[in-house]
């Protein structure tokens, strides 16, 4: 089974992100793989460990995204493909899906697995557009894989009314729910091996995309500016035995927000 | 990050490793070729993640559950089993050990960065990693090939653990008083008999077997340390195919009941109660202490890491708490009863405490990373003269790291408890546990006083003081570079004053010798260690400040920032603020912290010998 996992490098949201003049301040940001993509990679690794085959990770961006690709290689991906561009900042899901579709058009694979959305933009549009551009079936929000073969796969999907079970012919695109698997931690050996695994870099301009795709004219949506969300008010801790704390909490809710009044 | 969460100062660690020391350059040497810049960055990031997600959640449960002896075996807190396994599966347990036997072969500088994270995650498990890799290295350096093949791969995979057995009921600081005996069996092995006490991790149900590195006296050998030989003694014999064989008559009847560090069993270990214990020599007869010193030097730096790792965590937790806790009005508005209450971080006294903590942590980090980086440089340098000069500096820095960083780490945690106020004294917050766990660090691996004697009596006395003179020379060569420095020139002059005091005190030791003999010198050895270490750390922080200043100026140029716009720029650019903070921290350390240690020398300066004269 050949699996492609497109990954996005995003700012680590655990850290304090600063915004100035509607832009995110780049210095001091630490960059990580979007957490849903880590789940996608974990799913891909587990599938190939079970059914054989290889995982290729793919990312679009400046040389910096090689850090994310290398981390994915350290976790166990077999090879990496870096679509090099000067900057992918400001791109929307449509552009990304176009570039991915073009890149993957003549590749051999059975399955494309992605996170269900990116941790920074939270849009969740790219995988669906990608499936559309490639003319592939797609199932979203997967919680488990069953009966894996190169030709088809059974998928458990978390839907509105419970778990939906569907069978999909391959190749196809799936997006994963984070309950599917806990992403593994990198091992020292994995990190050292990562340098020795193949990482191919392809210039985005050599893909033969229509020029307007890469320009702002290719945008379907545009982020006009960033704003920092309001600071969350400090929470209050109620300590002690529940016979004391529960009435205290009730009292507070009544008094401060008029609940149960 | 909250006041009870795991935290690593990854920004400072990265600065130290990559921008100050340039540890990535070690990868130019074939020995460390896998450890290039990208690999180092990823390892720093991943070890932090591992320590925070896997190790740290065990800290409290380890403390509450503790270890116990049951059916002759030490039962460990259950929460440690899976993290222990995972540490070895992922390679964090045997990071710097020989790759030929299953280690990862990392530079010790990287090893320190990772240990700083793991010790903050779990001091108990880190003691397993450290002692086991130390024992493995002893066997690799001094053992016969058969011992290496039989034990080392299992030690480095975490299947077995290792210990160092020096202490006995009557032989603590005075190791030479050991009476554990060794009698040749005739086939190269020895019968071992005796009781060792205080043995960290002397048994644990985390592992299948324990390999003890035991100091014992061969029959007829002279008294004192010169008569000691080192042995590898397994708890259970190991068959040729790696499976476990017969028991080796090694028994752990009890463990100590301690104030902290409850996840590392401190054991009484009885060897040969039934005359059936066999050990194999590591190094020649009578070579026990020089051999053991290899492990002890490593272990001393390892122990110092506890002061750094826990100290750094405490400093960050205290800072987070000070931002959360609201109490009292701002001092400038204290007369106004309606003024809003402010987070305690706005109170000058709390800020003073927080910077005291932070400056000490960064100073410890500077000292320790310098020592480990020197070790890596030694391992990658062919030039014998350069090696020996660097080794001399490491020899001098080792007791400073052990003595100073363990004491200073404790000072940091103690200040942290103060910043938290009442809750710092409760078990709801981890600070009190940090204190209890860390409290042993200035005691084991040679107490602070023993480190001071090592520094003053051995290292500084060596070659008529050549090592110490070389250190002062290096500092002397650096200082002129601050002469015209736009931010650091004045600070350089303040610092120069401490160097002169230090040099005067060292020279004055001759005179003290004449007046009060060696007792007079020994009396002020521990304060001297504290002062000398703080000056050495100050020198290293000043080097870092020069780098930080250059980087800050470069960032300002890059963004077209003039002096007027700098304050605003610092507010919005965290990287720039980090560099500015490094300059502030260094200044505070030099102007406000070093004098606290210099103050300890008041008695020496006045030639005060009261403690020798008083009748107790
Ligand atoms: C939790 C724990 C784990 C340990 N793990 C190990 C281990 O794994 N292996 C091992 O071999 N040992 C271990 N030890 C023992 C430890 O190394 C000793 O406790 C330490 O060396 C001090 O020896 P002591 O306790 O006998 O104290 P003493 O030697 O009796 O010292 C008491 C006091 O006298 C001072 N003192 C003693 N001699 C001198 C001197 N010559 N000059 C100046 N001051 C002096 C000391 O500084 C100290 O303040 C451990 C101890 C503890 C508490």
Image (cartoon, coloured by chain):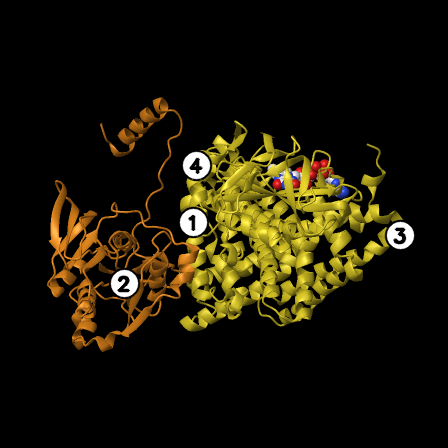
Q: Nearer the viewer, mark 2 or mark 1?
A: 1
Chain label for disc 1: B
Check the rendered structure and report the hue given to chain A. orange
> What residue is drawn where x is 31% and y is 47%?
A182
Q: CA distance from mark 4 to mark 3?
A: 58 Å
Residue under numbered circle 3: B514
Chain label for disc 3: B
Residue B273 percent location from the top left of the image: 65, 31
Identify the secondary structure beneath mark 3. helix
> Around disc 3, counting alpha carbons within 10 Å, would you say few (fewer than 14), some (14 to 19), or many (20 or more)?
few
> What residue is drawn where x is 43% and y is 56%?
A188
Task: Let me know if marks 4 and 3 both belong to one chain.
Answer: yes
Which comes sooner in the sequence, label 1 or label 4?
A: 4
Residue under numbered circle 2: A56
Check the rendered structure and report the hue given to chain B. yellow
B181 or B3: nearer the viewer: B181
Could you tell whether B137 is left or right of B173 in the image?
left
Quadrant placement of the C terminus of chain B = top right
Residue B589 percent location from the top left of the image: 61, 55
Which comes sooner in the sequence, label 4 or label 3?
A: 4
Could you tell whether B393 is left or right of A103 in the image?
right
Q: CA distance from mark 1 to mark 4?
A: 17 Å
Residue under numbered circle 4: B79
Chain label for disc 2: A
Q: Are marks 1 and 4 in contact (CB under 8 Å)?
A: no
Q: CA distance from mark 2 to mark 1?
A: 24 Å
Identify the secondary structure beneath mark 2. strand
Q: Nearer the viewer, mark 1 or mark 3?
A: 1
Compared to A113, does B214 lie above or below?
above
Q: Are marks 2 and 1 in contact (CB under 8 Å)?
A: no
Compared to B268, does A219 lie above or below?
below
């Amino acid at each position: 089974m050949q699996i492609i996992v497109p990954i996005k490098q995003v700012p680590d949201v655990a850290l304090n992100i600063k915004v100035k003049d509607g832009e995110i301040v780049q210095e001091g940001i630490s960059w990580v793989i979007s957490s849903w993509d880590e789940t996608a990679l974990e799913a891909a690794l587990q599938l190939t460990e079970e059914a054989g085959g290889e995982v290729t990770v793919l990312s679009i961006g400046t040389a910096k995204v090689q850090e994310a690709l290398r981390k994915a290689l350290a976790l166990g991906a077999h090879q990496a493909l870096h679509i090099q561009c000067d900057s992918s900042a400001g791109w929307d899901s449509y552009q990304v899906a176009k570039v991915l579709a073009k890149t993957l058009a003549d590749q051999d694979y059975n399955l494309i697995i992605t996170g269900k959305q990116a941790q920074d933009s939270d849009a969740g549009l790219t995988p669906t557009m990608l499936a559309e551009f490639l003319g592939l079936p797609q199932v979203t929000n997967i919680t488990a894989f069953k009966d894996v073969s190169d030709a088809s796969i059974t998928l458990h999907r978390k839907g509105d009314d419970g778990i939906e079970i569907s069978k999909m012919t391959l190749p196809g695109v799936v997006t994963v729910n984070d309950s599917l698997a806990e992403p593994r931690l990198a091992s020292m050996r994995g990190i050292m091996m990562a340098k020795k695994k193949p990482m191919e870099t392809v210039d985005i301009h050599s893909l033969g995309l229509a020029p307007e795709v890469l320009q702002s004219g290719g945008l379907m949506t545009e982020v006009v500016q960033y704003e920092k969300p309001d600071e969350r008010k400090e929470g209050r801790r109620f300590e002690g035995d529940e016979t004391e704390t529960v009435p205290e909490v009730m009292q507070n809710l009544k008094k401060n927000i008029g609940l149960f009044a | 990050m909250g006041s009870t969460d795991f935290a690593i100062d990854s920004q400072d660690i990265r600065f130290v490793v990559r921008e100050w020391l340039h540890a990535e350059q070690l990868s130019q040497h074939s020995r460390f070729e896998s450890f290039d810049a990208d690999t180092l960055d990823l390892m720093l990031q991943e070890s932090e993640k591992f320590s925070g997600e896997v190790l740290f959640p065990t800290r409290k449960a380890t403390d509450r559950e503790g270890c116990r002896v049951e059916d002759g075996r030490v039962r460990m807190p259950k929460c440690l089993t899976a993290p222990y396994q995972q540490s070895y599966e992922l390679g964090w347990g045997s990071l710097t050990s020989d790759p030929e036997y299953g280690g990862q072969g990392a530079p010790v500088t990287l090893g320190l960065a990772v240990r700083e994270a793991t010790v903050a995650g779990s001091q108990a498990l880190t003691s397993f990693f450290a002692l086991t890799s130390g024992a493995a290295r002893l066997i690799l350096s001094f053992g016969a090939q058969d011992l290496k093949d039989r034990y080392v791969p299992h030690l480095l995979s975490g299947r077995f653990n290792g210990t160092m057995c020096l202490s006995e009921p009557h032989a603590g600081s005075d190791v030479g008083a050991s009476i554990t005996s060794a009698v040749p069996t005739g086939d190269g092995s020895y019968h071992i008999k005796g009781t060792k006490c205080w043995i960290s991790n002397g048994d644990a149900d985390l592992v299948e077997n324990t390999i003890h590195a035991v100091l014992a006296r061969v029959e007829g050998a002279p008294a004192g340390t010169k008569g000691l030989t080192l042995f590898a003694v397994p708890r259970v014999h190991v068959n040729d195919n790696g499976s476990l064989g017969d028991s080796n008559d090694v028994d752990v009847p009890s463990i100590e009941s301690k104030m902290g560090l409850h996840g590392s069993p401190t054991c009484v270990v009885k060897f040969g109660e039934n005359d059936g214990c066999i050990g194999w020599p590591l190094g020649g007869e009578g070579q026990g202490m020089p051999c053991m010193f290899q492990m002890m030097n490593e272990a001393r730096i390892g122990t110092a890491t506890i002061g750094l790792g826990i100290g750094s965590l405490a400093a960050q937790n205290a800072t987070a708490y000070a931002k959360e806790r609201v109490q009292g009005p701002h001092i400038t508005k204290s007369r106004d009863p309606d003024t809003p209450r402010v987070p305690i971080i706005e109170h000058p006294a709390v800020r003073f405490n927080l910077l005291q903590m932070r400056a000490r942590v960064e100073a410890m980090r500077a000292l320790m990373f310098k020592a480990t980086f020197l070790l890596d440089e030694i391992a990658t340098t062919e030039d014998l003269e350069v090696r020996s000069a660097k080794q001399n500096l490491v020899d001098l820095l080792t007791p400073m790291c052990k003595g100073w960083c363990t004491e200073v780490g404790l000072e940091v945690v103690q200040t942290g408890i103060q910043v938290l106020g009442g809750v710092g004294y409760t078990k709801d917050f981890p600070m009190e546990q940090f204190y209890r766990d860390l409290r042993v660090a200035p005691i084991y691996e040679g107490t602070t006083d023993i480190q001071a004697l090592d520094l003053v009596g051995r290292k500084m006395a060596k070659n008529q003081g050549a090592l110490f003179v070389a250190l002062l020379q290096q500092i002397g060569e650096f200082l002129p570079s601050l002469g015209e420095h736009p931010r650091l020139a004045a600070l350089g002059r303040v610092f120069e004053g401490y160097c002169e005091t230090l040099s005067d005190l060292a020279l004055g030791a001759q005179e003290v010798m004449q007046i009060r003999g060696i007792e007079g010198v020994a009396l002020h050895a521990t304060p001297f260690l504290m002062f000398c270490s703080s000056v050495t750390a100050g020198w290293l922080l000043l080097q870092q400040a020069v780098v930080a200043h250059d980087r800050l100026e470069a960032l300002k140029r890059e963004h077209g920032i003039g002096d007027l716009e700098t304050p605003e720029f610092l507010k919005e650019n965290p990287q720039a603020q980090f560099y500015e903070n490094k300059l502030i921290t260094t200044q505070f350390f030099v102007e406000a912290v070093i004098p606290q240690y210099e103050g300890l020398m008041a008695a020496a300066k006045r030639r005060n010998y009261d403690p020798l004269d008083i009748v107790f």
